[in-house]
Amino acid sequence: MTVRDDTGGACPEGDRGARGWREAADEALYGPSGFYRGPAGPAAHFRTSVHASPLFARAVARLLCRVDAALGHPAEVAFVDMGAGHGELVTGVLAALPAEVAARARGYAVERAERPPGLDPRVAWRAVPPDGVAGLFFANEWLDNVPVDVVEVDSDGVPRLVRVRRDGTETPGEPPAGADAEWLARWWPFPPGPGGKPEPGLRAEIGRPRDAAWAAAVATLTRGLAVAVDYAHTAGARPPFGTLTGFRAGRETPPVPDGSRDLTAHVALDACALPGGRLTRQRAALRALGVRGDRPPLSQASSDPAGYVRALTRAGEAAELTAAGGLGDFGWLLQPVGFPDGPPPGLLDDLLTGDGRTDCLPAASPIAEGGLLVDVPDHEEQ
């Protein structure tokens, strides 16, 4: 017997109120009472690179200066902060720019919540990215909050869409079909078990909505660079049981779509990448942008105690931003836009290798220790 659930779809008896994770998470995060609509903002619940240290915003400001140079120092250069929270990153970037670039820079904060009070008046607050701008589009921990559906292999070895109620209770739904099935087959195929079928309990997240969101975001740039920074995995190293989880008040929690917590899943960044995109690790990119965790010489402690303390603090913050096993492992997707002959020399090269080491991997490889995640091959539009 089937009944109608609260979205109007058919569901088995006992599955009343359940729906796919993509729909449930979208309402829980961005609906009228959603997590990201609240006044406290993300910083009250979890710590990103932006909140860890002002060194991050200064590094992004250096990257914007590189983009400005690559564009020939136009009359206006845009910085678009996608998923801006309370505008912390765009504010820090504008403040860190040299005067000559700051005079031409236009900052945009893109967020569904209302504009926070006291935000720098130079920052334009928008619900969607500006269209037709040239500059740097920067999405720090945005794609992991683009909701996706979840698939789990049942006891018969059949992958099925996972349906979830508001209290987090899950039930199996139909097998994925159409474009979702094609995406899974290409980007996150389940390995066959001993009987030729996938092992029960394996899970995957269908990243197709993120691919589309990234393509749409990149399309708003006429020329420049789009960057996505996030928890990431690549083909050959997909997590066997998925990554969907929750965060609330600084702690990881079960993923419950009730609006009380963040809902996040790591991003298949290689699937998002468009032709010409390159992937690297945060530690490599930030080192190339001047964020290094070198301790100051101990002799400075006696000759300049205050300066030594400041330098030691900066070194600790830099170490956190570039740490293995932490923020340094984040993936950076670098997508040049509007350079038909390829990005100008000096825009990307050292971002891929960090401190000069060569950490390149072939396509579809596990994430590397150190620099380049994966050199993404051109693939057809998704």
Image: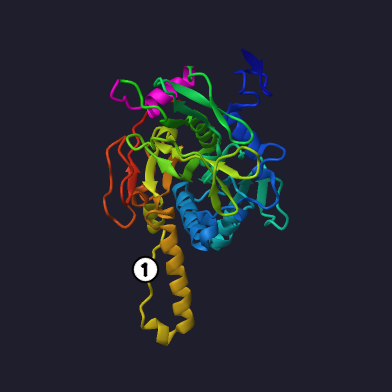
Q: Quadrant of residue 18?
A: top right
- In this view, the residue in front, 74 or 62, is 62
Comparing 16 with 243, the one in front is 16
Quadrant (top left, top right, bottom left, bottom right) of the N terminus: top right
Dot 1 amino acid type: Asp
118 vs 282, left or right, is: right
Which quadrant of the structure image shows residue 294? bottom left
Magenta stretch holds residue 192: yes
How was the colour assigned to the protein in this rendering?
rainbow
On the image, the x and y values in percent for residue 53 come to 51, 62
Question: Which residues fall within the magenta stretch?
Answer: 178-195
Q: Residue at 45% of width from left, 21% of height from top?
A: 181
Residue 8's quadrant in the figure? top right
Q: Quadrant of the C terminus?
A: top left
Q: Residues within 10 Å of mark 1 (few under 14, many from 20)?
A: few
- 178 over 151 or under it: above or below: above
Q: Relative to residue 61, is residue 337 depicted above or below?
A: above
Q: Which residue is mark 1?
A: 294
Q: Residue at x 62, y 18 (%)?
A: 13
Locate residue 238 relative to residue 127 in the image: left or right. Answer: left
Image position of 92 with respect to 183: above or below: below
Residue 47's spot in the image, x, y percent? 54, 55
Identity of the residue furthest to the top in this view: 1
Q: Residue at x 52, y 60 (%)?
A: 52
Tell me the element at label 1: loop
In the image, residue 219 lies in the stretch drawn in magenta: no
Q: Is residue 335 left or right of residue 216?
A: left
Between residues 21 and 332, which one lies in front from this camera angle?
21
